Image (cartoon, helix red, strand yellow):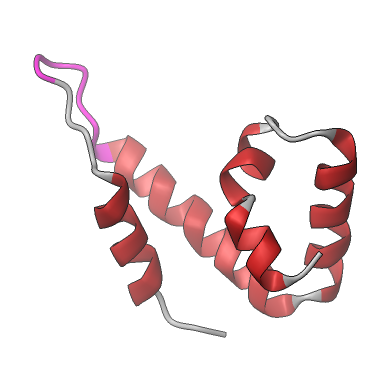
Amino acid sequence: MTCNQLTDRLLDYLSDDSRAPTRMAARAHLRRCRNCRVYVRGYRAATALVRRFCIDDDPPLCVPDDLLHCVLAALPQA
């Protein structure tokens, strides 16, 4: 698996929606690639932050995917 393939399949990997071979390939790539480990860590931190500030009041706070991607893109690169 390449870095681009990992980022393309990241949501599936993190949500366990991918097939076992894809998960295994992603895990193997993450063991070898520090940059992708940093990227995944930043992605998890950003999504946790978004979840932390989501309120169960009406209407629920929804963060558009493009905003989340912009936040992730602004994270420092390793």
Q: Is residue 57 left or right of residue 5?
A: left
Q: Position of residue 35 (x, y in %)?
A: 65, 78
Quadrant holding the N terminus: bottom right
In the image, 29: left or right of 73? right
x then y, percent, for residue 30: 78, 64
Name the quadrant of the C terminus: bottom right
User: Up-down: is 46 above or below 3?
Assistant: above
- Which residue: 89% across, 60% down? 28
> At which x and y percent is residue 45?
46, 54
59 relative position to 18: left or right: left
How many numbered tags mark residues here?
A: 0
Residue at 89% across / 48% down in the picture?
24
In the rendered view, does 58 fall on the left or right side of 38? left
Look at the picture and state if 40 lies above or below 36: above
Q: Which of 17/60 is in front?
A: 17
Q: In this orientation, which residue lies closer to the viewer: 70 or 37? A: 70
Q: Residue at x 57, y 68 (%)?
A: 39
Residue drawn at 17 percent across, 22 percent down: 60
Residue lying at the far top in this picture: please name it: 58
In the image, is residue 77 part of the stretch drawn in magenta? no
Whether residue 33 is situated above or below residue 9 in the rendered picture = below
Examine the structure image and report whether residue 56 is included in the region drawn in magenta. yes
Where is residue 59? Give x, y as percent.
10, 19
The span shown in magenta is 53-59
Q: Main secondary structure of the magenta part?
A: loop
- Check the image and name the residue furthest to the bottom: 78
Q: Quadrant of residue 8?
A: bottom right
Q: Is residue 47 above or below residue 38?
A: above
